[in-house]
Amino acid sequence: MSSALATEKPRTTSTAKMKIRDARVSDLPAIIKIYNAAIVTRISTAQLEPVTPEVRRNWLTEHSSDRHPFWVLEISGHVAGWLTLKPFLPRAAYRDTAEVSVYVDEEFRRRGVGRALLAEAIARARSLRIDAMVGLIFAHNQPSLRLFEQLGFEKWGHLPRVARLDEIERDLTIMGWHA
């Protein structure tokens, strides 16, 4: 996908089909656009400064479609959102636990994009050899907490004031799911 397509306003999503697939290098501009928009909101990432393709050039190669995928959800040729599964912690005992991250383009929010991506991760967890997933979500990100809860994640932990976003201390909620 060209960067021009990634920034065009989508025509419609009411009848458009959602397609989840492995992310490609050509998706990187759209992926970064979605991520940088999330950085500005201070609700879904601890990243404080926008990222560039140069900084994130290895983002896709750090994932593998058979174990820790990086997926995009497409609607009418537009990347509407993305999901990553990555190793939770580097120690071998955590090998079957993945950290899940989901981001949705502002133009496609409240249309089931995040739900579809997270449901796909749950449905494919066994084939990816993942027994547990962990989502690290800011406590003030109520839409994400509700989404994870609706799809069977439970609150596994609460870390008070562990992040500082623009001089505001924020809590982190750990949401977990078992296969």
Image (tube, grey):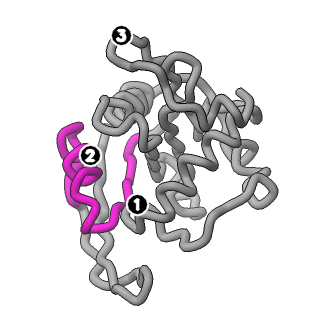
Q: Nearer the viewer, residue 115 or 97?
A: 115
Q: Secondary structure at mark 2?
A: helix
Mark sitting on residue 163: none
Which residue lies under the disc numbered 1? Answer: 44
Which residue lies under the disc numbered 2? Answer: 148
Task: State which quarter of the image contains the N terminus.
Answer: top right
Q: Nearer the viewer, residue 72 or 16?
A: 16
Task: State which quarter of the image contains the C terminus.
Answer: top left
Q: Secondary structure at mark 1?
A: loop
In the image, the segment drawn in magenta is: 131-155
Answer above or below: position of 107 versus 44: above
Q: Secondary structure at mark 3?
A: loop
Q: Residues within 10 Å of mark 3 (few under 14, many from 20)?
A: few
Q: Nearer the viewer, residue 50 or 138?
A: 50
The answer to if 96 sits in the magenta stretch is: no
Answer above or below: position of 157 versus 15: below
In the rendered structure, which amino acid carries the disc numbered 3?
Thr
**Which quadrant would residue 166 be assigned to in this image?**
bottom left
Question: Which residue is at a point 60% across and 48% down the rendered structure image?
Answer: 33
Mark sitting on residue 15: 3
